[in-house]
Image: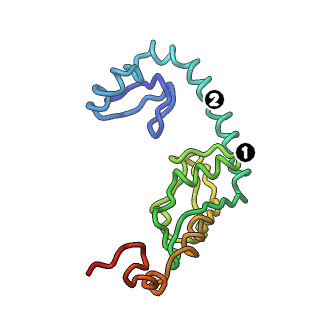
């Protein structure tokens, strides 16, 4: 089914585009939400001015995204996470944590813009791709380091000899049973 878009729809088109979509998508989503209409001559003329404004907005947004990409090009972020002695994280570092670290550094990055195929599960440094737009991609170096709490917990752990010491009757505050 051919429809004329009334709003910008990611991965489909911008205002004023005539697109071919499935009947179900048109009937169940685009038409009921007033995102598209029939591509008549009157509708095309009515949306021509809106299309010009949409293209100007897209160009301004594209320039802002390119500027943000230039600022991100040499950025490195450090994320502290709890890990065992072998460097395996107790949890994982995902797109949400990376986006939060970038926002703390002053960059406007959302978790959906971080292209991380699998979560980071080890202490490591990884190049992560951040997609600010369809054609504006930048790589950011992410350092995953051991958190201070994890280091202290490793230092405070008892060895098996420490646990066995003092377990004779009465040494741990309990009475010996006879």
Residue at 70% x, 45% y is 106
- Disc sitting over residue 78 in the figure: none
Please tell me in which quadrant of the rendered image residue 150 appears: bottom right
Crowd tier of the residue under label 2, counting other residues whose Cα lies within 10 Å: few below 14, some 14–19, many 20 or above:
few
Farthest residue to the bottom: give it. 161
Q: Which residue is mark 2?
A: 57
In the rendered view, does 125 fall on the left or right side of 31? right
Q: Residue 97: percent from the left, percent from the top?
A: 55, 53
> Which circle's residue, 2 or 1, is located before the other in the chain?
2
Please tell me in which quadrant of the rendered image residue 75 appears: bottom right
- Disc sitting over residue 67 in the figure: 1
Residue at 70% x, 57% y is 73
Q: Quadrant of the N terminus?
A: top left
Farthest residue to the front: give it. 178
Label 2 element class = helix
Q: Quadrant of the C terminus?
A: bottom left
In the rendered view, does 58 fall on the left or right side of 27? right
Please tell me in which quadrant of the rendered image residue 37 appears: top left
Residue at 36% x, 26% y is 30
Q: Residue 78: percent from the left, percent from the top?
A: 65, 61
Residue at 53% x, 47% y is 111
């Amino acid at each position: 089914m051919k429809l004329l878009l009334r709003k910008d729809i990611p991965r489909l088109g911008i205002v004023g585009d005539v697109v071919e979509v499935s009947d179900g998508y048109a009937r169940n989503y685009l038409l009921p939400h007033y995102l598209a209409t029939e591509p008549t001559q009157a509708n095309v003329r009515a949306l021509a001015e809106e299309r010009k404004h949409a293209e100007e907005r897209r160009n301004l947004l594209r320039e802002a995204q390119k500027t943000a990409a230039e600022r991100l090009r040499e950025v490195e972020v450090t994320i502290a996470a709890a890990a065992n002695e072998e460097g395996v994280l107790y949890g994982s570092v995902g797109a949400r944590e990376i986006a939060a670290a970038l926002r703390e550094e002053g960059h406007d990055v959302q978790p959906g813009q971080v292209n991380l195929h699998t979560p980071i599960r080890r202490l490591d440094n990884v190049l992560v791709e951040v997609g600010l737009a369809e054609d504006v991609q930048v790589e950011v170096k992410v350092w995953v380091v051991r958190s201070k709490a994890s280091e202290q917990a490793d230092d405070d752990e008892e060895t098996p000899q420490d646990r066995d010491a003092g377990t004779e009757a009465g040494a741990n505050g309990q009475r010996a049973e006879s």
